[in-house]
């Protein structure tokens, strides 16, 4: 053998197969290393707590620790040495021996060990501990006693000792693993035996519990079998009713003198920490020592014997039925194993209690159904009597209803005929009265002109003239009132600026008379309607605002504001313009509200409700009239698909409004139509179809947006050329007056070019 001292190594090999403990063997290996290599000290460093890594791979630990040392044990034992930054760590990582002749000069010298021992380390030899390619630790020796450097023979000798140490550590690991497996196997067998015994008991309990459906018997049998699983000094079963847990059964309390009051105990679950926790988690709780638990509620003198407690909730499908509570006079008596066994019993108990509950509920339902069937039978007999009586009454009522329907149908026919006669009469009366009344007005006007002023005859003639004019207005409005009811108009686009201009011209003298201020927006939206009727509505509203606006007694002249409000959505601006407008409209969708606001004294709510009824006047003292105007307005606007209304606040004026439907198009109503070059392609054909006068008239109509004239002209063009006419009508329906104007100008230019 190359190592000069073989006897110590052979002795170590012999010790490996004896009963020498691994700790003693490692110490012997370290001492042998010091003796054989004649060094000052030696040490064994291990990477403890790690799983052995495959060969040539880095270990899963960051440091080595001194496990055995020959000297300085009080300083070095269990001292950590980092793998990165130490000579031992380099040997462990590279898995190769290393001789260091000048330790302080080595790049990974770790001086902390030298500081602990105050030993001057000059040279060092370290070899890895490895078993079947798995690294375990490092065996190192320090400073040969004679001062000579370490050589290859020292490496072989220390490597042999390291192999013996690695084998000893592996044997120790295998023995420890075997002992652990034996202990686990025995524990598993014990657990299986206990589980088998518990399963047998639970099978018996299940058979007993499911053999009855009576509540009281179920509770008694639960108590009878708890002791077969877990011992106790006292036990009780609680049932839950809402937030209250009440003790229904108990055993063992007779030994402590509390059996008589047991069933009087009812606890509020939210106020008892243990019961509240079990209801929330549906898990058992164990209190090893109730004297150390601040939340323990049984603190009365008669309960001083209780030392430990286990509670198990009885639940099924997240529904809590009750609790099983076991009490012991021995501290720390109950274990987690007891909780598992009781939990299994609680599951069986929950099923039995649930079945008993369903059985009781079914019995109650059967009893209730029998009582209900009896009551139903009596009620049915009573109903049969009532049906016979009511059938007779119904037959008489049917005969009377038939007679009444016949009379009603006759009355409807007569009323419709009467309405037609009245409408014809009103029209006839209006026309027949107009001719003689015209003579009266004409002759009375002539008399006023020829009779001398301040004469009695002149005054009488003026009264006749005034009265005749008033009668003429009444007849005109009666005729209009009748015509509106019968008329059927087609909705067409209305050019509101043109309508407003016509109204202002009609009322010019009245505006001048009242010295009124008229305010209106710069632009008006396009809507659908009948221009003549819309003009009448504006004229009526504005004339009323002129008559009743202002405050003559305060020398305030009328101020009339015209405007409109879009009803696409209830915006803040709309609410500010007319407060309460949305509340008064039934169908605001796709409509625009037009309104007239005055600065008059305002109207009371009672007056507002009567305004649109026929023959209702606003203020008899400020203006004369007969009250037909607003009723005619209401009929006109409703015929056009809109609504009318009024809002007013006393002292803040009045707002009359009406709504008209909007012509929907892809363009916004406020945006001018975009010009398109496609329509101008018809300029030359249009120049051939029309005269210069026609084109000149249409150019003016398109410039001011006169829809009716443009529509009539487009229809006439359609008869001459369907393609051009259809293109014009489509453009007109989009209110694209700019394109039509451009087409007409191009056509006129084409005519002028031809003449040249």
Image: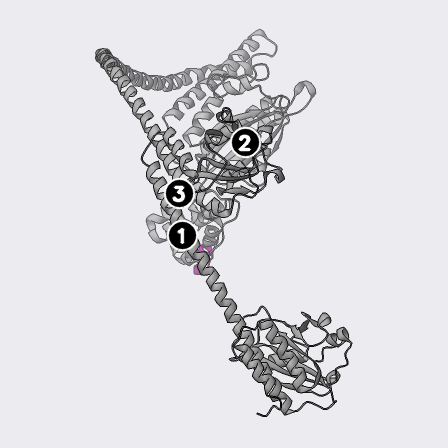
- Residue 727: percent from the left, percent from the top? 39, 52
User: For residue 644, which numbered disc appears in the image?
Assistant: none
- Residue tagged 1: 193
Task: Tell whether position 563 is magenta.
Answer: no
Provide the residue designation for mark 2: 595
Q: Position of residue 612 (x, y in %)?
A: 48, 21
The quadrant in which residue 188 appears is bottom left
Choose top left, top right, bottom left or bottom right for residue 24: bottom right
Q: How many numbered marks, from 0 up? A: 3
Start-end of magenta stretch: 746-756
638 or 57, which is in the foreground? 57
Check residue 712 in the rendering and tell me which mark sits there, or answer none: 3
Q: Earlier in the sequence, mark 1 or mark 3?
A: 1
SS for tag 3?
helix
User: From where the camera sits, is residue 650 visible?
Assistant: yes
Residue that lies at the very extreme toward the top in this rendered image: 456
* Residue 607 % position (x, y): 54, 18
Q: Mark 2: give few (<14), some (14-19) or many (20+) Cα within 10 Å.
A: many
Q: Is residue 426 placed above or below 313 in the rendered structure?
A: above
Task: Tell me the SS state at disc 2.
Answer: strand
């Amino acid at each position: 053998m190359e190592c000069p001292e073989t006897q110590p190594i052979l002795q170590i090999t012999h010790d490996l197969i004896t009963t020498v403990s691994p700790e003693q063997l490692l110490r012997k290996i370290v001492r042998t290393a010091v003796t054989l290599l004649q060094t000052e000290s030696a040490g064994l460093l291990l990477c403890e707590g790690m799983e052995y890594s495959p060969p040539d791979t880095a270990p899963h630990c960051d440091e080595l620790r001194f496990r055995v040392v020959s000297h300085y044990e009080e300083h070095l034992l269990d001292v950590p040495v980092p793998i990165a930054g130490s000579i031992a760590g380099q040997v462990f990582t590279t898995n190769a021996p290393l001789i260091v002749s000048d330790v302080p000069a080595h790049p990974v010298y770790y001086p902390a060990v030298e500081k602990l021992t105050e030993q001057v380390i000059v040279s060092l030899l370290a070899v890895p501990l490895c078993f079947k390619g798995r690294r375990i630790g490092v065996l190192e020796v320090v400073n040969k006693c004679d001062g000579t450097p370490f050589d290859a023979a020292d490496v072989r000798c220390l490597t042999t000792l390291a192999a013996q140490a690695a084998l000893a550590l592996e044997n120790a690991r295998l023995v420890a693993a075997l002992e652990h497996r034996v202990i686990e196997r025995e524990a598993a067998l014990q657990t299986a035996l206990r589980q088998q015994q518990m399963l047998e008991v639970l099978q018996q309990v299940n058979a007993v519990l499911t053999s009855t459906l009576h509540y009281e018997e179920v509770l008694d049998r639960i108590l009878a079998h708890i002791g077969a699983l877990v011992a106790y000094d006292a036990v009780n079963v609680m049932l839950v009713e809402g937030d209250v847990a009440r003790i229904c059964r108990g055993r063992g309390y007779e030994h402590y003198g509390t059996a008589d009051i047991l069933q009087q105990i009812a606890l509020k679950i939210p106020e008892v920490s243990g019961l509240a926790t079990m209801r929330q988690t549906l898990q058992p709780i164990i209190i090893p020592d109730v004297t150390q638990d601040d939340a323990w509620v049984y603190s009365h003198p008669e309960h001083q014997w209780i030392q430990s407690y286990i509670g198990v909730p009885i639940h099924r499908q997240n529904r809590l039925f009750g609790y099983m509570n076991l009490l012991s006079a021995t501290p720390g008596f109950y274990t987690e194993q007891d909780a598992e066994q009781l939990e299994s019993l609680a599951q069986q108990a929950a099923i039995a209690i649930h079945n008993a509950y369903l059985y009781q509920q079914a019995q109650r339902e059967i009893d209730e159904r029998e009582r209900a069937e009896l009551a139903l039978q009596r009620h049915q007999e009573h109903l049969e009597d009532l049906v016979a009586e009511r059938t007779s009454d119904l037959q008489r009522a049917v005969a009377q209803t038939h007679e009444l329907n016949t009379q009603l149908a006759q009355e409807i026919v007569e009323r419709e005929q009467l309405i037609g006669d009245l409408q014809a009469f009103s029209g006839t009366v209006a026309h027949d009265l107009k001719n003689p009344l015209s003579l009266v007005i004409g002759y009375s006007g002539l008399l006023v002109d020829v009779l001398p002023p301040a004469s009695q005859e002149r005054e009488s003639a003026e009264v006749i003239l005034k009265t005749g004019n008033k009668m003429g207005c009444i007849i005109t409005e009666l005729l209009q009132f009748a015509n509106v009811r019968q008329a059927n108009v087609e909705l067409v686009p209305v050019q509101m600026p043109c309508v407003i201009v016509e109204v202002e011209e009609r009322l010019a003298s009245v505006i001048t008379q009242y010295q009124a201020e008229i305010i209106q927006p710069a632009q008006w939206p396009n809507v659908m309607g009948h221009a003549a009727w819309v003009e009448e509505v504006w004229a009526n509203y504005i004339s009323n605002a002129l008559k009743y606006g202002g405050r003559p007694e305060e020398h305030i002249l009328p101020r009339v504001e015209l405007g409109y409000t879009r009803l696409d959505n209830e915006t803040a601006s709309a609410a500010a313009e007319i407060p309460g407008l949305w509340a008064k409209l039934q169908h605001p969708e796709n409509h625009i509200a037009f309104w007239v606001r005055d600065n008059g004294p305002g109207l009371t709510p009672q007056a507002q409700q009567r305004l649109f009824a026929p023959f209702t006047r606003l203020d008899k003292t400020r203006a004369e009239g007969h009250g037909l105007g607003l009723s005619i307005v209401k009929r006109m606007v409703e015929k056009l698909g809109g609504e009318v209304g009024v809002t007013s606040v006393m002292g803040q004026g009045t707002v009359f409004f009406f709504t008209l439907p909007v012509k929907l198009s892809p363009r916004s109503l406020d945006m001018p139509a975009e010009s398109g070059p496609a329509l101008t392609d018809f300029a030359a054909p249009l120049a051939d179809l029309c005269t210069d006068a026609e084109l000149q008239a249409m150019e003016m109509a398109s410039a001011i947006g006169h829809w009716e004239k443009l529509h009539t002209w487009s229809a006439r063009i359609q008869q001459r050329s369907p393609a051009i006419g259809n293109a014009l009508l489509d453009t007109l329906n989009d209110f694209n007056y700019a394109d039509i104007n451009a087409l007409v100008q191009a056509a006129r230019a084409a005519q002028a070019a031809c003449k040249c």
